[in-house]
Image (cartoon, rainbow, N blue to C red):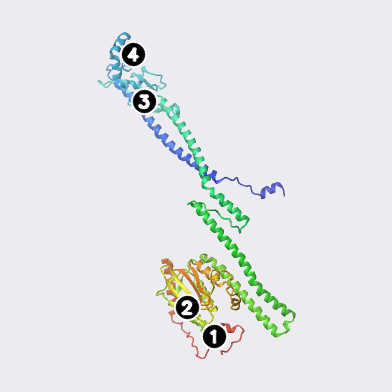
Amino acid sequence: MTDQAEDQVMPKQRKRWSLKWKWALGTAIGTALIFICFSMLVYKSFTNLLLRQEQRDVVSAITTVQQSLRTEPKGLTIHSVAAKLQPEASVEPASGMYERKRGAIQGKIFSDSELTALSRTNLAVTVYDPHGTTLYISRKDSHEFQKSTKRQVNMVGRGHAAQLVGRAPIRATATHKLIGYAQVTNSLADYHNTTYNLVWIFIVMTMIAIFGATLLGYFLAAFLLRPMRQIKETINAVNADPQTDSRVPDLRRNDELSDLAVLFNDMLDQMQRYITQQQQFVEDVSHELRTPVAIIQGHMELLNRWGKDDPQVLSESLAASLSETKRMQSLVQEMLDLSRAEQLEINFSHETTDVQKLVTQAFNDFKMIHPDFHFTFDDDVKKPVYAQIYRNHLEQLLIILLDNAVKYSTKRKEIHLSLSTDIRYIEVAVQDFGEGISKDNLDRVFNRFYRVDKARSRDKGGNGLGLSIAQRLVEGYHGKISVESVVGQGSIFRFHLPILRDPELLAEAQAETDKVEKIAKTELPAGIKPAVYSKDEPPLDDHEHDDGDAKQPK
């Protein structure tokens, strides 16, 4: 195989990312997004606040210029504007010095404290006459003259080149005549410096926050995911030896990982039970099938050698082979029943049954089948009680328990059957007065292929699967089964099933019961007569037809 072919066959291994790094990066990205959104919100609010303050300064400067110059009724000149906006410059030096000492000029300047706003370095004040001729300029202004009919402040430019330009007409107070125009330009130098510093502050804080969140997320993930290493070690131990006793140690943490560790240990315990049961199942099946196969093989070899010419040997060999074949058939059927009992919730989750009616039916059937036994039925249920169980499964469960009670009865051939309820469960109990079960065997009677007395069970045709099937059926429908026994006095098997409380299923079950009862009570169709049996005629038995000849009653 060429290298190209090997590259096509072998898939490329994806780069592995540790969960700690994924957690750390996710935390960092989340923190960055949150911090960036918060920073943008704060930045936008703060810059809007600063911009509104700068606009107020421009408006205030324009208002100051208007109020200072509107008292000139004859119009504005260079000297008059300078005298108003720069009063100190219009005073002669000598007299000005004298007046300064007396505090006259100082009082004038500070009395016009609003003029101090015009001295800000970021403001450029320009005054024009009505024709657009410049009369006064405080600082260089790159914006050209524009007439304006009202006071307005506009943003000119973008980014760091943006400036605020305010324009307003100047009218005389007395005549309301237009005597000039005022223009105030704010370079927004303080605003741009503040926003620039603010951006860098947010960038640095964001980087610090991302770095801190990454470290915190990494170490937090490493701490929280520390139990995963222990779980991984346990998994590796189980992969190396499925029967190992290694388990995840107690994490001593009340969180989801602790719950996961408990569930994982329970899963391992259950898996090992399944492995043990499987091994035991294979061993038991092999042992159970080995005997009948050996018996059948022995009889076939016997017939093959010389027994086929001897009618007696032929008959005995055929009878024994058929008996063993039937026993193997029974074993296979019970194994199928056991496997089906493990899938009850999947296939029979909506089945319901009237327990009282079915238990009564089973009681009457066994009374008829075993007339040599004395059956008693204690029914404490006064009205129909439904359980969420398939009818055939409940019938199979009752047959298993009643059949065992009959099989293992000794001298006292008496069977007690009882039915009772409490708030949540309906209880069925089957009691016999046979040989009983020892305490050592009570915990194992529900195991597969387990028989208390194997020799006696074999004589009675038991395979040791009946109680295992019964247990699976009861537990599959969320019930419980138990046994009480005393050696030499008999046993009591009890099982509990939850009473059906679902209104919809209960209504459907009652409707189905009413439908069946209605059909049973209807008259027979025309032309069909009920069967009439003679007193001297014995009842038919299906088993009497196995050999093809009807047997006469004794």
Q: Which numbered disc, 1 or 2, marks the residue that appears first in the sequence?
A: 2
CA–CA distance in space, label 2 to label 3: 109 Å
Q: Nearer the viewer, mark 4 or mark 2?
A: 2
Q: Secondary structure at mark 3?
A: strand
Location of residue 206 in the rendering, given as x and y in whole percent from the top left corner: 47, 36
Q: Nearer the viewer, mark 1 or mark 2?
A: 2
> Which numbered circle lies on residue 540?
1
Outermost residue toward the bottom in this view: 536
Label 3 packing within 10 angstroms: few (<14), some (14-19), many (20+): many
Outermost residue toward the left in this view: 174
Residue 294 falls left or right of residue 257: right
CA–CA distance in space, label 4 to label 2: 129 Å
Residue 399 falls left or right of residue 39: right
Q: Nearer the viewer, residue 430 or 554?
A: 430
Location of residue 212 with respect to 163 vertically, above or below: below
Q: Which residue is mark 4?
A: 89
Q: Which numbered disc, 4 or 3, marks the residue that appears first in the sequence?
A: 4
Number of callouts: 4
> Which numbered circle lies on residue 166?
3
Residue type at mark 1 is Leu
Q: Which residue is mark 2?
A: 416
Q: Secondary structure at mark 1?
A: loop
> Which numbered circle lies on residue 148?
none
Location of residue 27 with respect to 95 vertically, above or below: below
CA–CA distance in space, label 4 to label 3: 26 Å
Please identify the quarter of the rendering in which residue 186 is found: top left
Location of residue 430 in the rendering, given as x and y in whole percent from the top left corner: 49, 75
Q: Secondary structure at mark 4?
A: helix
